[in-house]
Image: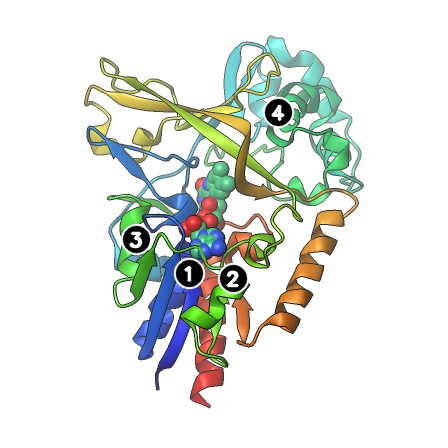
Amino acid sequence: MGGTATIVGAGLAGAAAAWFLTRRGFSVEVYEQAHVVGGHVRTEWFRGIPYEPHGAHIFHTDHRSVWDLVSGTVEFVPYRHRVLTRLRGRLVSWPPQRAELCASADFTDIALELADRPGAVDESDFESYCVSVLGPTLYGESVRGYTEKQWGRHPRTLSAAVARGRVELRNDGCHDFFRDTYQGWPRRGYGDLVEALLRQAVVHLGCRITLKDLPEVSQAGRPVIVTSALDDFLGEAGALQWRGVRLQPVYLPETALAQPAMVVNEPSVTLAWTRSIETKWALPELHDRLGTLVLREYPGAEAKHYPVLDAAGENQRTQRELEHRLLGQSRNPIHTAGRLATYSYINMDVAILQGLRVAEKVAAQEEC
Ligand SMILES: Cc1cc2nc3c(=O)[nH]c(=O)nc-3n(C[C@H](O)[C@H](O)[C@H](O)COP(=O)(O)OP(=O)(O)OC[C@H]3O[C@@H](n4cnc5c(N)ncnc54)[C@H](O)[C@@H]3O)c2cc1C
């Protein structure tokens, strides 16, 4: 039992790995470049109102084990996420509901197109995928502008993988954005969850670690779990393309709730932001209290938020090359987990699962 392990990054993936290993008796040191743990999901508070400086985060999963871990670690409030989108000046459900659109004379042309869609989804690229699911007009008015703003490139240059599982047409009256069995929001925010997972580990804040720093923080041959972006970690920043967002908060002291759902999408290219977010929706006990924060999400910031899955697959090829080089150059057994190190758009439950799986592997190798 036991041993030592080094973890780079104190987001959910790194924290889940630390949680697993410390429970197995490992001595774990976590190095985090920021001055606070939590990574991308950390929640902030202003006058008792939660807001999310890196974008809305709703916990949703079908993995019972992940739900048991998070909800057994901190208190979760039941919350079913709803998203609305602006279409021809009206707010309608997102994902779109066929019956809702067909019921309104404003959308007759869209309803006719929906009846005339191809039987199979076109997987050639993002735009082809969406047009085959939504028809050209609904796609053009609710997705194309949003996507151009979000990614800063033509939707045809994005892989269909960006749309798969995210763009759909519904006809079942289900207005929950996510369909997972377990959904909720941590009552004291995500920082609370990450701090609890890291409780038994030694955390070094303000420490940016790259491959060349490993001799200082880990003995040769000891396992290292990397959750940072591999281009940064290998000292090749810029090799991978990322897309970032900037959240602009507005505090409304005289308003209890400012919008009819936590997230309102703004697909029109005449507005620079893609959506507005009111995290207060997650905590019903705050709904009647005056004072709320709405954050507008502006794409195009210098931050590593979304990997760019281009239709030609170039960035994924670069990622594979970086993974190969990393394994060849290190004197430590290196394991990767999390959205940055795997260059993938993954939800929180998958980040946690990846952290747990690499930790399990480390434990199995060290204990045999
Ligand atoms: C806008 C947006 C909205 C999202 N909404 C949802 C949602 O509603 N539901 C959901 O399930 N998922 C959502 N996600 C996904 C979710 O944010 C990720 O799954 C989660 O943050 C992944 O955690 P992680 O530990 O892999 O990465 P991170 O949280 O990024 O953690 C990595 C950590 O490593 C640190 N680090 C990086 N480089 C170094 C270095 N060289 N040295 C030391 N430390 C370093 C970083 O500072 C960071 O703290 C969303 C993502 C985005 C971009």
Q: How many marks?
A: 4
Tell me the kind of residue under disc 1.
Answer: Gly
Is mark 3 in CB contact (under 8 Å) with mark 1? no
Give the alpha-carbon distance from disc 2 to disc 3, as whole Å.
18 Å
Please name whichever residue, 22 or 104, is drawn nearer the observer in this view of the structure: 22
Quadrant in which the N terminus is drawn: bottom left
Ligand 1 within 8 Å of the CB at mark 1: yes
Which residue in the protein does label 1 denote? Answer: 14
Which residue in the protein does label 2 denote? Answer: 337
Which residue in the protein does label 4 denote? Answer: 149
Q: Does label 1 or label 4 sit earlier along the sequence?
A: 1
Q: Residues within 10 Å of mark 4 (few under 14, many from 20)?
A: many
Q: Is residue 268 above or below residue 94?
A: above
Q: Residue at x 26, y 68 (%)?
A: 200
Q: Does label 4 or label 3 sit earlier along the sequence?
A: 4
Please name whichever residue, 367 or 101, is drawn nearer the observer in this view of the structure: 367
